[in-house]
Image (spheres, helix red, strand yellow):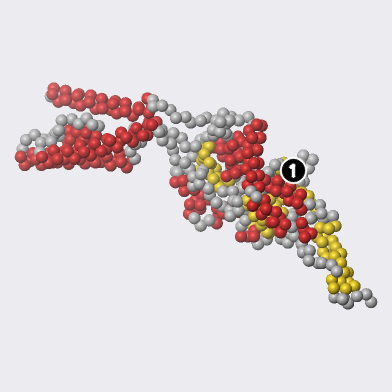
Amino acid sequence: MSHDMLVYRKCLYCSRGDPSVQLTGHWNAKTFKTVFSISKGRADVWNLMGRTLRVVSAPYFPYMDYVRRPDLKINSSVVARDCSDWRIIKEFSKRLNFSPDLHAEPDRNFGDERGGQFTGIIGQLQREETDFSTVIGTTPGRLKVINFLRTYPPDVFVITSLKPALLPSHLALVRPFSGEVWLSLLVGMVAWGLTVWVLQRAWEWAAGGRVAEFSTTLLYGWGALLERPPPDPSVSASGQMLMGWWLVFSLIISTGFKSSLIAHLTVQGKSSTLDTYQDLVNHENWRWCIEPWFYTGAVLEYFAKHTDSVVNEIYRGMEVMVADTALQEMKHGGFSLIATKNYIKVVVGSRYTDSKGNTPYYISNNDISVFPAFMWAIRKGAPFFSPFQTLMRRLEDAGIIEYWTEEVIDQRVKENRQSADLAPVVESREQPLGLNHLQGAFYLLILGSTLATLTLLAEILAHIH
């Protein structure tokens, strides 16, 4: 009876990429000596022997983009365009010796959970119909059914709106003060005039003599604010004291108004920017939207299950609209688009920016985080998960992934601009001071002249009678 034993090991990809067994050596029972080594571990998964791995994806530039194959109009197989995910996949395929077979998710659905079962990309991985997917977001439910491989930092959400416009010119004269200041000034002037008139009446009752009319004291207060007060109507020391304090008050107010007016006319004011969800809900009758292909899965779950009241209000008012339609709608005002930063940068830079970099749209500076990171999704039990993870960390540590992402964005914007017939972008320009800026002063001149004319007519009629 032979004392030798042949020992085999499972080799996952040795038979032209399919599972097989591999003779590793023999074991001698009499001498208890091994003449082979079975400590190779999972080294075979670093060479997939040309195996074809099925990759499922949804277009999401700059991470993944593809075109349909004209010879396969029904089949989901697609041809990748230059994008960061495809560059990574090609690098992996060279290092691990496999062939990627890229397929499109037919409904462009990343995956919604329905009773523990997922649709879209996550559903295909859960049913092991595909090997791995490109960029996708994580949710607690997805983590239970598939493995995730961290690939990119999170692509944050931003708010795209029209750029801040110049404030109306006809309001330049009143803009130096806020509405509360103007209202307080009006109430203060009337109250001061009434106080002077009451003091004068009280002096007349006590000592006799002439008394100023209420209109006279009121016009004196107005004249002092305009730095052209009429003759002092006071006849008592108390009235003169009140007049003195009003002149000091008028000096402070007029100095503040003139300095603020000069500043506002020198640097023309603009409307405020929209950088946060709070800014959206604070604007009356403002609307916002998101792209339909993105408003599924993790993004929809983020808005629907968020506990913050502002995000809840954004969710209740959310409209669904493609980016190009939304950007056209913005031109009418009162509308914004919520989208990921890298995606909307390409859209605006490609089709809505002129050769000098001018665009009518403003992309918010305040980043809104929705995902902890962007991942690749890999089916449970896939033996190549560990090699993928190692290679991904090497690319990330070397800065290659970030470099590729920025490079494909710049290249795609250039390509789109070269192939598109771009409409001219109207740029807002600062204007020198003109009649439209100072028309308020002429309104006051007309008002004063009208009041003076009416006063003259009243005096003539009173004299005749």
Q: Is residue 332 left or right of residue 460?
A: right
Q: Is residue 239 above or below residue 15?
A: above
Residue for point 55% across, 56% down: 305
Q: Is residue 273 left or right of residue 27?
A: left
Q: Is residue 275 left or right of residue 381?
A: left
Looking at the rendered structure, the kind of residue marked 1 is: Val
Image quadrant for the C terminus? Answer: top left
Name the one closer to the observer, 181 or 328.
181
Q: Dot 1: few (<14), some (14–19), or many (≥20) neighbours within 10 Å?
A: some
Give the residue at mark 1.
Answer: 79
Q: Is residue 200 above or below residue 398?
A: above
Residue for point 70% across, 52% down: 133
Q: Position of residue 161 (x, y in %)?
A: 51, 40
Check disc 1 and report its element: helix, strand or loop. Answer: strand
Q: Position of residue 7 (x, y in %)?
A: 86, 68
Do we see residue 21 in this rendering? yes
